[in-house]
Image: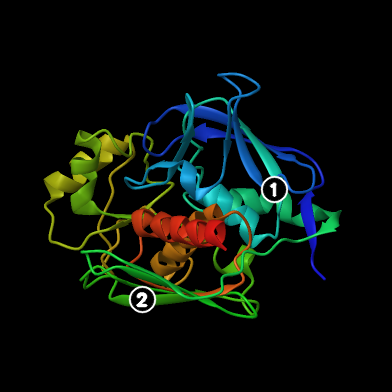
Amino acid sequence: MQFQHTLRKSYSFEGKGLHTGRVAKMTVNPAPVDTGIVFRRTDIGENALVEALAENVSNTARSTTISKGEASVATIEHILSALTGMGVDNAVIDIDNVEVPILDGSAKPYIDAIWSDGFEQQDAPRKYIEISEPVTVTNEKGSSIRIEPAEEFSYSIGIDFNSKVLGIQEAKWDSSVVYPEEIGTCRTFVFFHEIEFLFNNGLVKGGDVENAIVIVEHPVTDEQVDRMSKLFNVPALKVREDGYLSNLRLRFPNECSRHKLLDLIGDLRLCGGFLKAKVTAEKAGHGINTTAAKAVRQMLSLA
């Protein structure tokens, strides 16, 4: 029997949000049995709680936001993924602003702080999310997620951005994969040609060259690269021969698909717990991920 687990102590993180650029302090706290994952907006009040559940999803533009009443919390997927990958059932997450800090663009800062301390086993069995029949979600962009009943969990994802640099990539998570080492360390990514558009539309205000892999798919001029350096307020950047901006080195050849898997794990935690199912995703993103989580929640409510 698997028991529920929580943290041994509280852990605090501080940094700017990827999209808002606002600085937030976030503290991940132990929580009692059957709490699940709950966010608390401490700048609003003690009772400004938002449960990490699919029915609370309010926005999926480039990240996942949940809301309840006047409280909203954005870009929750990395911390949810980290807690899921490390086997944490119950936690209350205090945050004093609207967006979770992006930190290094992966779940690694959470893993580095928490993993080595171990976890507190609780006196209650883990409540797995199990479905009785397959759930399939598709959209007009060619994305799909299929969740099937299974005895053990497994996640697989394929990405295809029609990119010469990325190519077609795949990644998987099951009991043979060590999440903290092989998935949680993988950083978010963005295409060079998207960055100015995103800035102009009020997104990635907190982005910088330390928290995102930048893919240069199309030829760019020195002037464009210089403008990017000024945008991020860093010394001159260069385009490497492999098609990536010179800000970061890849941690894995398929780091981008592994990061999409990281996001998928975090978004599907919105089902309300640990999925005991086979998850197969193609070209997935926050919109379809959370739609799949809602479909699972709906199925469970009718059971």
Disc 1 packing (10 Å; few <14; some 14–19; many ≥20)? few
Q: Is residue 46 above or below residue 262?
A: above
Viewer-nearest residue: 23 or 284 = 284
Three-letter code for the amino acid on which mark 1 is drawn: Ala
What's the residue at 51%, 37% (across, down)? 100
Which image quadrant: the C terminus?
bottom right
Three-letter code for the amino acid on which mark 2 is drawn: Gln
Viewer-nearest residue: 52 or 209 = 52
Q: Is residue 68 above or below residue 157?
A: above
Disc 2 packing (10 Å; few <14; some 14–19; many ≥20)? some
Q: Nearer the viewer, mark 2 or mark 1?
A: 2
| SS for dot 2 | strand
Tags 2 and 1 touching, CB below 8 Å = no
Q: Position of residue 275 (x, y in %)?
A: 59, 66
Choose the circle earlier in sequence order: 2 or 1: 1
| In this picture, residue 59 sits left or right of residue 162 | right
Quarter of the image for residue 234 reads top left
Q: Is residue 171 above or below residue 33?
A: below
Q: Position of residue 281 (x, y in %)?
A: 40, 72
User: Distance of mark 2 from mark 1, alpha carbons?
Assistant: 29 Å
Viewer-nearest residue: 135 or 179 = 135
Q: Which residue is mark 2?
A: 169
What's the residue at 68%, 38% (across, down)? 92
Quarter of the image for residue 163 reads bottom left
Q: Is residue 255 above or below residue 263?
A: below
**Quick check: can you spot residue 206?**
yes
What's the residue at 84%, 56% (across, down)? 124
Q: Position of residue 96 (x, y in %)?
A: 56, 25
| Label drawn at residue 113 | 1
Q: Position of residue 241 (x, y in %)?
A: 26, 68
Viewer-nearest residue: 81 or 103 = 81
| Label drawn at residue 252 | none
